[in-house]
Amino acid sequence: MCLPNLVSAASAASATTGSGAPYAFGGSAPADTSSIFTPANTNLALGTAGGAFSLIGAISKANNTVTADNAQANQLQTNAVNAEQAAASAVTSGIGTAANTETKGAQTVASQRAAMAANGIDVNASGTAQNVQKSTQYITDQNVDTITANAARTAMGYTQQSQSDSANAAAYRAAAASVSPTMAGATSLLTSATGVASNWYRNQRAGVS
C-alpha cells in the first residue's frame, strides 16, 4: 500500500505568499493595498492636509486680529479718558493761577496806596496816584486774561485729543466686531475644498489614477 505524499498534499491545499510563506488553511490572501497610494490619491491627501492647515491658520489669524483690534481700542479709550482728565486739570489750574495773579495784583495796588499815603499823597486824587494804580490793575487784568486764555486753549487741545481717541477706539471695536473667526475658517475650508476638487477632477480628465 502506498502512503499519500503529505508534502504535496499540503502544498496543493495551501497558497503561498510572495515570500513563499504559506497562508493558513481556509484563509485568504491579504488585500492588496498598493493601489491606494496612487499619484491621484496622494495629491488628494496632500490637498486635504493643506486645507486643514489653512483652516487652522485662518481661524488663528482672525482671532489674533480681533484680539489686537480690541487691545488697541482699549488703549485708545484709556488715552481718551486721560486726555479728558488733563483738560479738566488745565481748566482748574488756569483758574487757580488766574486767582493768584488777581490777588497779587490787588496786593501790589494796596502796597502802592499805602506808600503814597505815607508820603502824604492823596491816593484818590486824579493824576499820578490814580495813574499808577490803574496801570497796575491793567497789567494784572491782562495777565489774568492771558492765563485764562492759555488754560482754555490747553483744555480744548486735550478735549479734541480725547474725542479723536474715542472715535478711533470705536473704529477699532467695529473692525474687531466685523471679523468672524468662524467665517474666516469656513471661507478657508471652502477655498481648500474647491481646490482639492478641482485638482481631483483635472487628474481624472488627464487619466491620472
Image (spheres, rainbow, N blue to C red):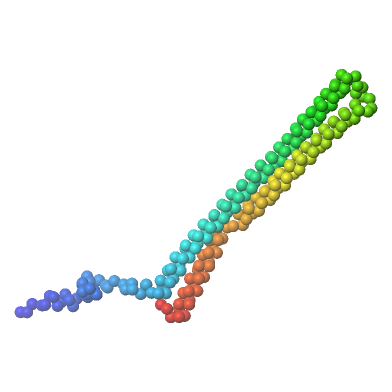
Residue 66 image point, x, y percent: 57, 54
Residue at 32 percent of width and 73 percent of height:
32
Q: Nearer the viewer, residue 67 or 199?
A: 67
Question: For the C terminus, which image quadrant?
Answer: bottom left
Q: Residue at x 48, y 76 (%)?
A: 201
What residue is rendered at 88% in x and 31% in y?
134
Judged left or right of residue 204, residue 67 is right
Residue drawn 33% across the image and 72% down it: 33
Q: Is residue 108 left or right of residue 3?
A: right
- Left/right of residue 130 with respect to residue 163 in the rendered view: right
Please determine whether, in this image, residue 93 is positioned above or below residue 208. Answer: above
Which image quarter is the N terminus in? bottom left
Residue 130 percent location from the top left of the image: 91, 28
Q: Quadrant of residue 11?
A: bottom left
Residue 142's spot in the image, x, y percent?
A: 83, 36
All told, the count of numbered labels is 0
User: 209 or 67, which is in the foreground?
Assistant: 67
Q: In the rendered view, tell whether residue 60 sits above or below residue 104.
A: below
